[in-house]
């Protein structure tokens, strides 16, 4: 079965004139592959976390991007040997664009569409010995100091021009039904109460 480890815990803090934010970056080991989700934008933290695991950027086989916001995707290009799974339904191998094949990441990993935060948002459901993890990107996220409570009706105000609350609520319900644990775009791992 797959293994999941958070390398960088995502954070988000609203400032007077913007945000201090970087996404959660998670390492998945599955089928002799190393998969990194949402490499984020804090290069120093990400490289330190990889180093603690004894890994270099060239060791990563796949980079999975939940969506294109820069706080999730800026560092994708530093993984020189990786193939990239994107929210466009494509896999990029350097300059080659290919249709995404089912089970490309292994039998323990499912890619699901989770629009709402933005229209092209996707997430992963990963089966592990501990249960199913949803690597949810910004379907679920919390700001610094906010109590982590699941509320499918919680407004998402970070990108108001892109958010579709009706679709986001449906994506939240889908993840809650499938997952035992949620790894949010920003915040701590959340155990789903069933």
Image (cartoon, grey):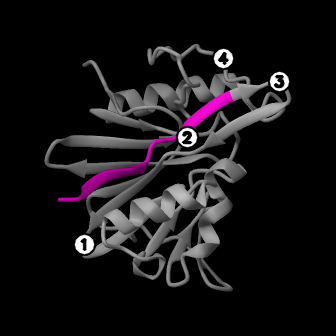
Looking at the rendered image, the disc whose residue lies closer to the viewer, 2 or 3, is 3
Q: Upstream in the sequence, badge 4 or badge 3? A: 3
- The residue that mark 4 highlights is 155
Mark-to-mark CA distance, 1 and 3: 45 Å
Q: Which mark is residue 4?
A: none
Mark-to-mark CA distance, 4 and 1: 38 Å
Q: Upstream in the sequence, badge 1 or badge 2? A: 1
For label 1, the crowd category at 10 Å Cα-Cα, with few meaning under 14, some 14 to 19 and many 20 or more, is few
- The residue that mark 2 highlights is 114
Residue at 64%, 55% (x, y): give it.
41
- The residue that mark 1 highlights is 31
Q: Secondary structure at mark 4?
A: loop
Pick whichever, 149 or 194, lies toward us.
149
Outermost residue on the left side: it is 129
For label 2, the crowd category at 10 Å Cα-Cα, with few meaning under 14, some 14 to 19 and many 20 or more, is many
Mark-to-mark CA distance, 4 and 3: 20 Å
Measuring from the top left, give residue 33's x and y in whole percent: 32, 74
Left/right placement of residue 50 relative to residue 119 reads left
Residue at 65%, 40% (x, y): give it.
21
- What is the tally of numbered marks visible in this picture? 4
The part of the chain drawn in magenta is 1-13
Q: The C terminus lies in which quarter of the figure?
A: top left
Indicate whether 70 appears above or below 105. Answer: above
Residue 103 at least partly seen: no
Q: Secondary structure at mark 3?
A: loop
Tell me whether the residue at label 1 lies in contact with that at label 3, contact meaning CB atoms closer than 8 angstroms.
Answer: no
Q: Upstream in the sequence, badge 1 or badge 3? A: 3
Tell me whether the residue at label 2 lies in contact with that at label 3, contact meaning CB atoms closer than 8 angstroms.
Answer: no
Q: Secondary structure at mark 2?
A: loop
Q: Main secondary structure of the magenta part?
A: strand
Residue 55 at least partly seen: yes
Q: Upstream in the sequence, badge 2 or badge 4? A: 2
């Amino acid at each position: 079965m797959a293994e999941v480890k958070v390398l960088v815990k995502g954070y988000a803090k609203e400032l007077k004139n913007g945000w201090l934010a970087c996404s959660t970056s998670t390492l998945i080991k599955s089928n002799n592959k190393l998969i990194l989700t949402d490499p984020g934008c804090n290069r120093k933290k990400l490289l330190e976390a990889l180093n603690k695991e004894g890994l270099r950027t060239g060791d990563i086989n796949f980079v999975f991007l939940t969506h294109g916001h820069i706080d999730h995707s800026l560092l994708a290009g530093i993984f020189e040997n990786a193939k990239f799974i994107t929210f466009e339904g494509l896999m990029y191998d350097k300059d080659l664009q290919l249709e995404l094949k089912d089970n490309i990441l292994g039998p323990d990993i499912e890619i699901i569409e989770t629009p709402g935060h933005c229209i092209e948002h996707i997430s992963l459901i990963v089966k592990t010995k501990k249960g199913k993890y949803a690597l949810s990107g910004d379907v679920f996220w919390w700001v610094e100091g906010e109590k982590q409570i699941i509320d499918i009706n919680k407004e998402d105000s970070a990108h108001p021009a892109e958010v579709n609350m009706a679709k986001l609520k449906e994506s939240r319900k889908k993840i809650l039904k499938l997952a035992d644990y949620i790894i949010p775009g920003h915040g701590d791992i959340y155990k789903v109460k069933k």
